Image (spheres, rainbow, N blue to C red):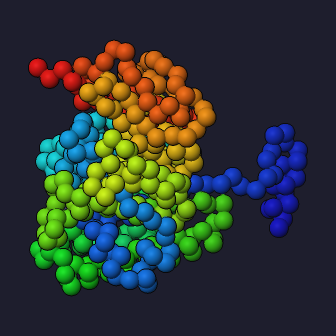
Amino acid sequence: MLLRGLSLMLCLLLAGCDLSPQAVQPKTLIVGMDGVQLLHYEQLGENTNLKKRLHYGKAYAGGITGRATEQETNSGPGWMTLLTGVWAIKHGVVSNNPSLRLDPAYPSVFRRLRQALPNAYISSVVNWAPINTAFLLEDAQGNNVRESGLTDDQVIQRTLEILDGTSADFTFIQLDEPDQTGHSNGFGARYQEALQNADTRLGRLLDKVAERQRKHQQEDWLVIVSTDHGRDYRGMGHGGVTEQEKTIFIASNKPLNEELTQPSIPEDNPWPNNLYSFAAQSSVATTVLRHMGLDLLPDWQLDGTPLLGNTGVRKARAKESEAKLLWNSTSEETVVIHRNGQVVANVQAKLQEWTDPQGMAQANDYVLVLDGTPVAVRNSPTDTH
Ligand SMILES: [Zn+2]
């Protein structure tokens, strides 16, 4: 009490002293579960942490099949898309080849957060080592923690230590048992058991976050749970472009916006069962950056629509045969269109299309900005010789 009284007196003597309650401190935990097929996770029933404690929606991985953003439904490309907010054509990790590194022009959330928040405590704790030891080797050098090759139980133990003993500003973890079990057994009882184990491990983390939130009420926790890819029809493999392999999910402790909760169909290319009406894997990074207080900048050319706050235009895409950009929006506001870093047009959002007078013979990086939310599109060049 004496100390508190003294500091209060000092406070009153000093100009500019802030007596208001402590500012909100954003925190994020991403729980990556490798190779989880949403349908099979849901088949565990209503008592999972996914069903009882999180909001979730279907999403897609693998980019848009047949277009510039198509990528393998494998772990390297998938986790890097999730952590950068761009597809592999930009981040460069097009396969699981361990010689690949993230393109520094499209850094991960680890690097963007380190630049914006020099004192943040940033961790990446993974079972499948190449995430840290290959693809993020240079990008995540600024992390406080980079640990790789742990068992799933060790990953959880380490994460609980981080959540207990540090400021834990941003933590990414990867659990691998569902993927390993799928590869060796396919779908079936063993795979369901692996999913149950992953869900139980998730529960321990959610308990710890809840405890921490009670102790530190100024902290605002975002927990996101997702996966890198689905699985083929038997559940053993993945990498291809079947609907099942491309189907993933994004779950959160917070209610997320309509991009996750109200699918919006891209009419010219909806894909079977309207898969592309759901959120994209690239939306996780933009959601995290926004939650952590960073402004999403057009120059970053991020592909993912954020799942918190304004969505901006939705389902932005190129229709190269007509040199058009298309998007979904009912907004009365204006979309500002950038091409390769220059503003080239202002268009009413509800028109939902714009034709590039220069054509799309070359690959261009477009960014469409609505209500302060940018979303990027890179077209496939139509000039192919
Ligand atoms: Zn796998």
The residue drawn where x is 18% and y is 20% is: 383
> Taking 2 as reference, is 191 left or right?
left
The residue drawn where x is 23% and y is 62% is: 244
Image spot of residue 362 (x, y percent): 25, 20
The residue drawn where x is 28% and y is 28% is: 320
The residue drawn where x is 16% and y is 47% is: 95
12, 351: nearer the viewer: 351
Rendered position, 138 above or below 128: above
Location of residue 380 by image quarter: top left
275, 37: nearer the viewer: 275
Image spot of residue 304 (x, y percent): 41, 44
151, 247: nearer the viewer: 247
Q: Which quarter of the figure is the N terminus placed in?
A: bottom right
Rendered position, 3 above or below 352: below
Image spot of residue 160 (x, y percent): 43, 71
Rendered position, 118 above or below 156: above
On the question of residue 147 being in view, the answer is no
On the question of residue 35 being in view, the answer is yes
Image spot of residue 154 (x, y percent): 31, 73
> Taking 102 as reference, is 4 left or right?
right
Q: Residue most toward the top? A: 358
Q: Which quarter of the figure is the C terminus placed in?
A: top left
Rendered position, 87 above or below 250: above
> Taking 137 as reference, is 56 left or right?
right
Location of residue 126 by image quarter: bottom left
